Image (tube, coloured by chain):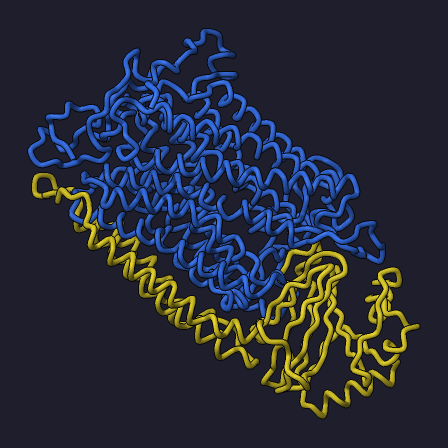
Amino acid sequence: MGLALLGIIWLITLVSTYFFAAKTWWLPHGASLATAGIDHQFAVTYLLMGIVFVAAQGALGLFVWQYRDRGTASKVTYTHGNTTMEAVWTALTAILFIGLNLMGSPIWAAERFAPAQAGSVPVEVTGMQFAWYFRYPGADGKYGRTDPKLMDPSAGNEAAIGLDTSDPASKDDVVTGTMYVPVNREIDLTERAVDVIHSFFVPQMRFKQDAVPGLIIHMHFTPTEIGEYEIACAELCGLGHYKMHGMLHVVSQEDFDKWLATREAEK
Amino acid sequence: MATSATVHSHAAPQGFIRKYIFSLDHKVIGLQYYFLALVAVFVGMFLSVLMRFHMIWPTAVLPIIGEIKPETYLSLLTMHGTIMVFFVLTTAPQGGFGNYFLPIQIGAPDMAFPVLNMLSFWTTFVAFVVILAAFFVTGGAPLHGWTGYAPLSALTNSGPGEQLGADLWITSIAIFCIASLMGALNFITTTLDLRAKGMTMMRMPLTVWAWFVTAILGLLAFGVLLSAGILLLLDRNLGTSFYIPLVVVNGQVMGHKGGSPLLWQHLFWFFGHPEVYIAILPGMGVASQLLSTFSRKPIFGYKAMVYAIMAIGFLGFMVWGHHMFMSGMSPYTAFAFSLMTMAIGVPSAIKTFNWLGTIHGGRVRFQTPMLFAIGFVSLFVSGGLSGPFLAQPVLDIPLHDTAFVVGHFHLIMGVAAIFGMFAGTYYWFPKMFGRMMNETWGRVHFVITLIGTYCIFMPMHYLGMAGQPRRYSQFTELTYLHHLIPLNEFMTYAAFITVAAQFIFVANLFWSMFKGPKASDNPWEATTLEWTTATPPPHDNFGGHTPVVNHGPYEYSVPGAPRDYVMQTDPPTVASH
């Protein structure tokens, strides 16, 4: 049974590690400024934890086989432990875990501590059961007033988020169900939710942030590759959670300006 | 320390009802908890089978059950999580084994408060009936997940199941909290006051340490969840706004204002994270006990193990915010929560090193309880090492709320904890029922379950890395998920096989109860007090006398001793530690 156990534990370890190492399934291709930092931190964590994983499982399998009961041939080492060893592995683990933590901190700080820089592109995201709406403030740079009483999800777009057309600032607001942003510009995101919590998740942007009713959350990210990226909802929001998706179009500045002008004209 | 003889007051009951139904005997109550959890685990497992079925064949129509709709899937998921966490992971290791063996292992005739003990079981039972009732009311069971995030859970019109079903859900949890508080008080008092002569704290088996610290966690955590649950009931039924700001549901402005959805998350996770340790600490205790016993070697670093249990319990209350990195709380707090979470990895790693150190240089016997203890260590390592990913806020950006998280917590608090229970069952079965379980079928059960659970839960990490969000009833809507469907299919088949193997366990359990070979008083040649008494133990545990403890709990292969184990009650001259 000792040999069987060794085989099973080692086999599980080998197969699990193979799929990690071969990157059969891996983080989706990243297309934002944050990708490099996050992916690097992920790879370092993965490598270190992978080494510990293989070492610990390997030792477990080896020990149970090596120290199997062989009758009188087995001689047990009578010991209650070893304080030096305890101190060494406690210190090593602490350095490993705390070190990893400190390493990742600057990336987190860059993502979350500073607001979007001047000159970024403002977009407001509103989550509701089960759709995402995107608002652009127009030439005045100001979002118009919204009123919960005016919200009509069945009418879509402006009406869905309850845009108050009597507010002058709302005149040039554009509301859409698809998100367009220019490439290589920082996006100044304002997140809101009207009913329950949703989470704005764009795997390829390495971006995720809950949208919470009652809170206005400011975030920013910078797409670096032109393309179409799927937006998912990552916080359970009700029966349509699995199909609450949207599309992010990252386009050239020129195409973005054209698209926005067309939308303004359609109003 | 009071002597146990002065506290024992109730005589052995005679009638069937007082003996087996409303019993005051901690052993009967322990078995009641155990069998309640056994029923619950099969309910929870059945729900998970339906979930895995739906994920692969979303439109298939099942006999009797019919088609599983997306909202039904969410109800299954909610009830699976709630039933498993509360009525299995909290109930069996602590209420079941803890109740049965904590008093015996410290040399006490019963729990400190037998009536409270009976009440706490029957309150748990009521909670279980209430949660099952949620399936049968109009609208069905709630769909807000076991975490019940507000406002989804606080509004009655946020989805099907959010009417009476959700009220029953939160009521059941509140009742469960009351039961757990009663249980926790009992465990703590018993451990502190009823230890036999010579049973100093540092001679307690690590199982007792685990149950003791788990009880302290329960005492501090369930009170908070109870309060949070009452506030949720008020929001739902009396128009208060603890968790609900001004919201508009499907065009309708709700009459709430100013509440905080994040308040629920803080209160829930202040309970929820210690709950993880409530589920796993008893398993750690059992693994420690078994690895030492079956390696015929003292536990490596007993004191370090005790301090690690305490450190885990202490730090467990300071890490709840790591569930909320993406929630919109201040990003500055992430540093503190992340640091504390990484810190809690240290005592967990110490335990793993010590388990390996215990096997190293031992003489390992591969009986079924030991197989599951070894499996526990393997799963604990696998589930534990994905923790440092999720503890880093920056890696939570891609991983939070994906299948990666589901894989992580299932391996460590689900499967590892359940391996702890299996190990405990095979180990203590002879003491509880006076017969041995079948070894061959035990091994078959072990091999299929170990490989099967890895096949189900390891791939979840890959799926999460690839961005598959959790709680999605199907993967057809987002095109980037399409290439993950074959892997999901593989997991579903693995789940079917693993679930089927659990019937081997149940058959073995009940067959052995009546037909298994008779067990001796100490079939594993173990050292702790439960193996010094008759099998099964008499009503007062030690047949009228109180044991006197002379040795530590894990004195195996002591040089110069007449046999390879020194029981805790052996005369002091045999050998001492």
Quarter assignment of residue A24? bottom left
Q: Indicate the chain coloured blue by its letter.
A: B
Please provide percent x and percent y for residue B386: 42, 59
Lateral position of residue B405 relative to residue A259, left or right: left
Residue A216 visible in the displayed image: yes
Q: Indicate the chain coloured yellow by its letter.
A: A
Placement of the N terminus of chain B among the 4 image quadrants = top left
Question: What residue do we see at 28% from left, 16% from top?
Answer: B546
Q: Residue furthest front?
A: B1
Quarter assignment of residue B388? bottom left
Please provide percent x and percent y for residue B169: 65, 39
Lateral position of residue B178 relative to residue A59, left or right: right
| Number of numbered discs | 0
Question: What residue do we see at 64% from left, 63% from top?
Answer: A210
Looking at the image, which is closer to me, B489 or B189? B189
Lateral position of residue A145 relative to residue A119, left or right: right
Q: Residue furthest top?
A: B14
Looking at the image, which is closer to me, B371 or B231? B231
Question: What residue do we see at 55% from left, 47% from top?
Answer: B270
From this view, report whether residue B27 is shown above or below residue A96: above
Q: Residue furthest right?
A: A166
Question: What residue do we see at 39% from left, 45% from top?
Answer: B449
Please provide percent x and percent y for residue B157: 78, 48
Placement of the C terminus of chain B among the 4 image quadrants = top left
From this view, report whether residue B338 is shown above or below residue B548: below
Please provide percent x and percent y for residue B316: 45, 48
Looking at the image, which is closer to me, A35 or B200? B200
